[in-house]
Image (cartoon, helix red, strand yellow):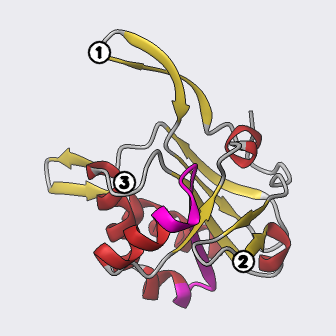
Amino acid sequence: MLNIGDKAPYFSLPNQDEKNVSLSDFAGQWLVLYFYPKDDTPGCTKEACDFTDTLDDFRGLNAVVLGVSADDAQSHRKFIGKYNLGLTLLSDPDKTAHKAYGAWGLKKNYGREYEGTIRSTFIISPDGEIAAKWSNVRVRSKTKAGESKHADKVREKLVELQE
C-alpha cells in the first residue's frame, strides 16, 4: 500500500497512440494519475469528461492528468474521439501499474466478490513522491450544496499542496 511521501512506482505504458509514456517523462511537474475500470462506461465517462473540463486549471498548476485502464490503445482512441477528451489515456492490460499503485484488487458488488480495478487517483509531486491519494473514488457525490465532482477535489488538493 502506498503512503504519502513514498516514491511513486515507476511505469512505462503505451498511450492511445501506442507511444510509451513513463513516470520519468514528468520529472519536475505535478502529475495526476487516475485509474479507472473501463472506457465508455457511465462512471468512467463522467470522470474523464470532468478531468477534461478542468484540464486548463490543471495545466495552470503545472500538472498533467493521465488516465490508466486495462483497455487497449484502440479502445482509448474511440473513447477519446467519442467524447472529445483532452486526456492522455494509458493502456495497462497486464495490470502492472494497477498493482504497483494498489488500484487492482478484490471488489464487492451486489454481494459478489471479484478482482478488478479499484478506482484510484494519485497526485505525484515534481520530485516523484506520492503527495495525495484517493482510493475507492466516487466520481460524483451528492452534497447539501449540490453535486461534488472528484476532479474538482483533486484540483483543490493540488492548489493546497502548492501553497
Nearer-N-terminus badge (2/3): 2
Q: Residue at (72%, 77%) from the top-left corner?
A: 19
Q: Is residue 51 visible?
A: no
Q: Residue at (67%, 73%) from the top-left corner?
A: 18
Q: Is residue 62 left or right of residue 159?
A: right
Query: Which mark is drawn over residue 74?
Result: none
**Circle 2 crowding by C-alpha within 10 Å: few under 14, some 14–19, many from 20:** few
Q: Is residue 12 left or right of residue 71?
A: right
Q: Amino acid at mark 3?
A: Cys
* Residue placed most toward the observer, 10 or 156: 10
Look at the picture and state if 60 lies above or below 140. Answer: below
Q: Position of residue 73 (x, y in %)?
A: 57, 66
**Part of the protein shown in magenta:** 59-75
Q: Is residue 63 visible?
A: yes
Q: Which residue is mark 2?
A: 19
Nearer-N-terminus badge (3/1): 3
Q: Which residue is mark 1?
A: 110
